[in-house]
Amino acid sequence: IALPSVQRGVAPPPPLAAVPEINLAAATAGDAEARSAAARAVARACEEHGFFKVTGHGVPAPLLARVEAAAAAFFALPQRDKERAAATVAPPAAAGSSFGYASKRIGAHGDLGWVEYLLLGVTAGAGAATAPVALAGAPMSASADAPPCCFREVLSEYIGAVRGLTCRVLELMAEGLGLGATPDVFTRLVLDGESDSMLRVNHYPPAPRPGLTGFGAHTDPQIVSVLRSNAAAGLEISLPDGTWAAVPSDRDSFFVNVGDAMQVLTNGRFRSVRHRVTVSSARPRVSLIFFGGPPPRERLAPLPGLVDREGGRRRYREFTWKEYKTSVYRTKLADNRLCYFETA
Ligand code: GA4
């Protein structure tokens, strides 16, 4: 496989001056005033950047350490073992998704990155944020004595925790939008038994030369994405003026991206943020991203309460998540996928 495109001679973007930051512990344990201030801050970050950082998240540090170690152990396996693990995965839960292990190839239309990854479907665990989750696409066991013997279990535990965190963030988003009367307007989609949510485990090996594209610029199709990485840098976001900013890594925090579906539901008020990963670091980057997605049958359209405030102009037509996914899997990574769903 040819190397992904290199941004030769281009200076790395400057670090994001002020990463919007939300302390979830302070927002949820504090008084009503602290909570509504946090909800407003979340809404502002989603409007301006479509991106913010979450501290005080409550996901135990030992769990983060275990999942990171298990991921590193999996990616350290011989290539043939990783590929064998990919061949033994459960069938994809949602049409269009490509679950399992892959190296360098992203999607089905020729996108390449300096990355290897596991893509897993989160297929069950309806009802409560704490309900156990099942995985589609997780390696059963790469080899008898290899570390992934417990990989599934630790990933399930991690997903349970990160999904709970995602729901608390989604509740703050609803409140920040003035939808406090229906706090579950977004969480119900992610907690649905048929929710098309996913976990992506990325490993960016040290780059053979600096400035290599690990994961090219794109927006995430889902409602929201919640990322955690080790201390290696690489994540960059596109600012409203089109320039890029590097996001300093922080292994003690989570980063939240607004996705395309959320941009639609909010009638464009929240921005689906373009982002990418550049591998310049000498040390490997490991990141885990939980993508909160709706059930395939779910009809998505701008929420009436938000359209009214804009004089009734609906910026997107109604479509099902299944329809959107089908469309997404026809596009290349960098493409604008929402334009086909805009109203005239
Ligand atoms: C980007 C966000 C998620 O990682 C993902 C990606 C998916 C894939 O890797 O299979 C896509 C990409 C993502 C958007 C456009 C299509 C589909 C690769 C690609 C070229 C799992 C997702 O849902 O969309």
Image (spheres, rainbow, N blue to C red):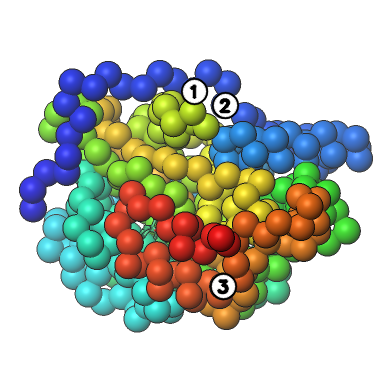
The answer to whether 8 appears left or right of 150 in the picture is left
- Residue ranking furthest to the front: 344
Which residue is depicted at the point 12% across and 63% down? Answer: 80
171 or 328: nearer the viewer: 328
Q: Quadrant of residue 152?
A: bottom left
Q: Answer whether residue 327 is visible to the viewer in this image.
A: yes
Q: CA distance from mark 2 to mark 3?
A: 33 Å
Residue 19: numbered disc? 2
Give the structural element (helix, strand or loop) at label 3: strand
168 or 317: nearer the viewer: 317
**Which residue position holds label 3?**
319
Give the structural element (helix, strand or loop) at label 2: loop
Residue 16: numbered disc? 1
Q: Quadrant of residue 182?
A: bottom right
First along the sequence among labels 1 and 3:
1
Give the structural element (helix, strand or loop) at label 1: loop
Q: CA distance from mark 1 to mark 3?
A: 35 Å
Category of crowding for the residue at label 2, using alpha-carbon neighbours closer than 10 angstroms: few (below 14), some (14–19), many (at least 20) = some
- Residues under numbered marks 1 and 2 in contact, where contact means CB atoms less than 8 Å apart: yes
Q: State the image coordinates of residue 322 (x, y, percent, origin top left).
A: 49, 76
| Position of 239 relative to 263 (above/below) | above
Q: CA distance from mark 1 to mark 2?
A: 6 Å
